[in-house]
Image (tube, rainbow, N blue to C red):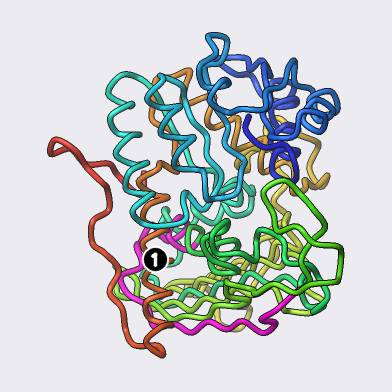
């Protein structure tokens, strides 16, 4: 694994626990974790359960005892690490968004397609697909119970940078993060909308805003601006919020809002889908619940009903607790690792693929183009895969 802080810790928890929960065709061994600071990465290795540590990801990729590389770094080096690992014959799990630019995502998808011809697999880490309620929503839509999809409403609301004195961390710098709320959390709801509906976004009209344009530079840190805390300001080079409308490939419409300035909202992912025969609604702050409305029933008793998604017949829940005993954020990563390892054991290409990550990247780029043109309509690139040699990769498997 490359990276060991927030995402690295969540992925480590998943690697440690996945084989204790699910019967798997392969059993992972946590061989090596990589970070730039030798003292910190060695401490992280012991704390998170890794057998050894490296300070150069290139040495990690070269190691014969590494068969899979998990990329948990900021987006500015996703492409370099993932492509090198794939070319070295290592399977790759890469955090979202896939890259910082469409060009990088294209290069990564091409590398993934070349590697797949030799049995080397890759997957992008959109963990919220693995919330059991979201997976159940996908099953309900796939079964046709919503009829024709008319509307999608998607929000991802956080508040961790409302304070203007919050420092200029890497997520607020375009050179490291690619974009702000748009790529960090907006990418998730774009993926969820396409995953649950089975449709693609075809165009957008967008606006973005940066509310706090300068922030205190952080204390000295490897790779970051160096200054005493609070004594200098740096420029925020990403969006604080993004709002956009879109059309779906099936004829419906969708609206999206991603912000890190919704005071009082910690991690509110809200998704509502309205169809000709019914509706679904989900809020991650009540992640074990799904609301379902059957519009074909008796109007006298019609309305949304609450489904507690904890039954062993619900997605992923056969390995967990008795009904009514809910899951949490960390379980989504265990499910993600489980799906990847099952695909490896079967010799299948796991999903979401790098091609699906590329499609999300194309939407992000269209949003930024539209916002730069004061909301003018932007078509989303119709290329769904950076295919090579005439081959194509399926986006919605």
Q: Quadrant of the C terminus?
A: top left
Residue at image mark 1: 363
Q: Quadrant of the N terminus?
A: top right
Q: Residue at x 32, y 84 (%)?
A: 377
> Which image quadrant is residue 110 in?
top left
Q: Which residues are magenta?
A: 193-215
- The x and y percentages for residue 305 are 67, 68
- The x and y percentages for residue 114 are 28, 29
The answer to whether residue 376 is above or below residue 338 is below
> Which image quadrant is residue 22 in?
top right
Depth check: 388 or 310 in front? 388
Depth check: 373 or 268 in front? 373
- The x and y percentages for residue 205 are 39, 83
Q: Residue at x 85, y 71 (%)?
A: 231
Depth check: 262 or 107 in front? 107
Q: Which secondary structure, mark 1? A: helix
The answer to whether residue 288 is above or below residue 217 is above
Residue 184 located left or right of residue 221: left
> Which image quadrant is residue 235 in?
bottom right
């Amino acid at each position: 694994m490359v990276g060991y802080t927030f995402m690295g810790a969540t992925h480590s928890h998943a690697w440690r626990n996945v084989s204790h929960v699910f019967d798997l065709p392969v059993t992972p061994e946590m061989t090596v974790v990589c970070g730039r600071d030798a003292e910190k990465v060695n401490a992280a290795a012991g704390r998170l359960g890794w057998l050894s540590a490296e300070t150069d990801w290139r040495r990690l990729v070269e190691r014969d005892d590494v068969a899979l590389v998990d990329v948990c770094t900021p987006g500015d080096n996703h492409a370099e690490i993932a492509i090198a690992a794939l070319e070295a014959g290592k399977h790759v799990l890469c955090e979202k968004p896939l890259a910082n630019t469409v060009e990088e995502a294209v290069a990564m998808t091409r590398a993934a397609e070349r590697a797949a011809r030799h049995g080397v697999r890759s997957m992008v880490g959109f963990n919220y697909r693995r919330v059991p309620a979201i997976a159940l929503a996908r099953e309900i839509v796939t079964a046709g119970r919503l009829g024709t999809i008319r509307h999608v409403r998607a929000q991802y609301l956080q508040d961790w940078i409302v304070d203007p004195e919050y420092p200029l961390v890497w997520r607020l710098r375009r050179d490291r993060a690619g974009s702000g709320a748009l790529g960090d959390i907006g990418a998730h709801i774009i993926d969820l909308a396409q995953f649950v509906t089975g449709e693609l976004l075809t165009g957008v009209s967008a606006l973005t805003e940066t509310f706090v344009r300068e922030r205190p530079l952080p204390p000295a840190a490897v790779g970051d601006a160096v200054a005493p805390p609070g004594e200098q300001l740096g420029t925020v080079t990403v969006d604080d919020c993004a709002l956009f409308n879109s059309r779906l490939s099936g004829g419906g419409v969708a609206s999206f809002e991603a912000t890190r300035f919704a005071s009082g909202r910690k991690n509110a992912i809200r998704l509502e889908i309205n169809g000709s025969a019914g509706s679904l609604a989900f809020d991650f702050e009540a992640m074990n619940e799904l609301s379902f409305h059957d519009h074909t029933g008796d109007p006298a008793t019609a309305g949304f009903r609450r489904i507690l998604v904890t039954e062993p017949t619900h997605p992923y829940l056969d390995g967990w607790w008795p009904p009514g005993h809910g899951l949490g954020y960390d379980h989504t990563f265990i499910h993600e690792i489980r799906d990847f390892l099952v695909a490896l054991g079967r010799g299948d290409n796991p999903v979401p693929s790098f091609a699906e990550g590329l499609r999300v990247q194309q939407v992000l780029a269209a949003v930024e183009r539209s916002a730069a043109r004061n909301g003018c309509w932007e078509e989303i690139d119709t290329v769904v895969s950076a295919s090579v040699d005439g081959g194509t990769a399926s986006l919605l498997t």
